[in-house]
Image (cartoon, rainbow, N blue to C red):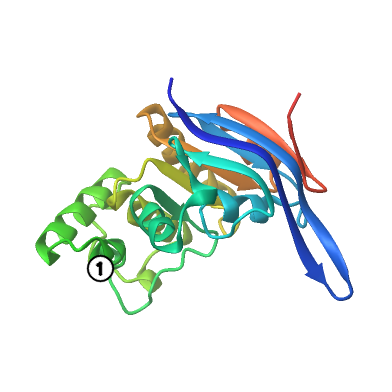
Amino acid sequence: MAEAVRMKGIERHYRAGEGAVHALRRVDLQVEEGEFLTVVGRSGSGKSTLMNILGCLDPPDRGSYHLFGEDICRCREGRLSRIRNREIGFIFQGFNLLPGLTALENTALPLAYRHLSRREGLRRAEAALVQVGLGDRMTHRPSQLSGGQQQRVAIARALAANPRLLLADEPTGNLDSRSGEEVMALLRALSAEGRTIILITHDDRVARMGSRKMRMEDGILSPER
C-alpha cells in the first residue's frame, strides 16, 4: 500500500500565561492509504492539536509532515489551502451546518470553492447524500433532521469533493449511542471502500471500531497494546 501520512518528530508548543504548554512531544505517525486509524485520549491530551496539523490548519514547531508524498512543512499558504480543499475532508463534532440551507445546499456549499458549476456541484452533492443514506432528505433543513442525520449530512459534505483523506474530530460526540453506532458503521463502510480515515475520540468504545488504534497522552502518541 502507498503511504498517506508520514510524520516524524512533530512538536507543538503553546503559550499559556507566562508559561508554555508542550502539546505534542516528538510525534511519529505513519498511515497507509485505505487505513482507518483512531486516536483516543482525554481532553487536553493533544488530540486536537494533532488533528489541526494533520489538516494543514496549523504548522508544527519542529518535525516533518508528508501528506501523500508532499512535504507539507514547505508549502506556502496558497498551496495549503488547495490541499485542504481538494485532498482533505473534515467531519466535526458540531456538524457545522448552516440552518437556513437544505441538506443538499449544505453538502454542495464547499464545492463552490472548487470553481465547479452549480449544476455539477449539486450533482456531486446529491450522489454524496445518497451514499450516506439520505437520498430522501435532500430538501430538509438541519432543524428537520435528527442528530445522526445531521452528522450524515456533514459526512456527505466531506465526501462530495472526493478527498483522499477524511479527518473526523469526535464525530459521535454529540450523538446518542444508536446514532453514534450508525455513523461509525458508515465510516467503516467508507473505509472498506478504500477511503483513508483518521478519527480522534475520547471514547474507547468508538476507538475500537477502526482498523488500528493509538493513544494520545500528555502530547505523546503511542500504539495501543
Q: Residue at x 34, y 57 (%)?
A: 157
Q: Amino acid at mark 1?
A: Glu
Considering every residue shown, the one lying at the far right of the view is 18
**Quadrant location of the C terminus in the rendered image:** top right
Residue 152: % across, % down: 39, 53
Q: Residue at x 40, y 33 (%)?
A: 189
Question: In the rendered image, which quarter is residue 109 located in?
Answer: bottom left
Question: In the rendered image, which quarter is residue 65 located in?
Answer: top right
Q: Which residue is mark 1?
A: 105
Q: How many marks?
A: 1
Residue 162: % across, % down: 30, 45
The answer to whether residue 123 is above or below residue 206 is: below
Q: Residue at x 35, y 57 (%)?
A: 82
**Quadrant location of the N terminus in the rendered image:** top left
Confirm whether residue 179 shows in the render.
Answer: no
Depth order, front residue of 33/186: 33
Depth order, front residue of 123/47: 47
Residue 135: % across, % down: 23, 52
Residue 183: % across, % down: 47, 46
Left or right of 154 on screen, residue 55: right
The answer to whether residue 134 is above or below residue 105 is: above
Left or right of 136 on screen, residue 220: right
Depth order, front residue of 121/220: 220
Depth order, front residue of 119/97: 119
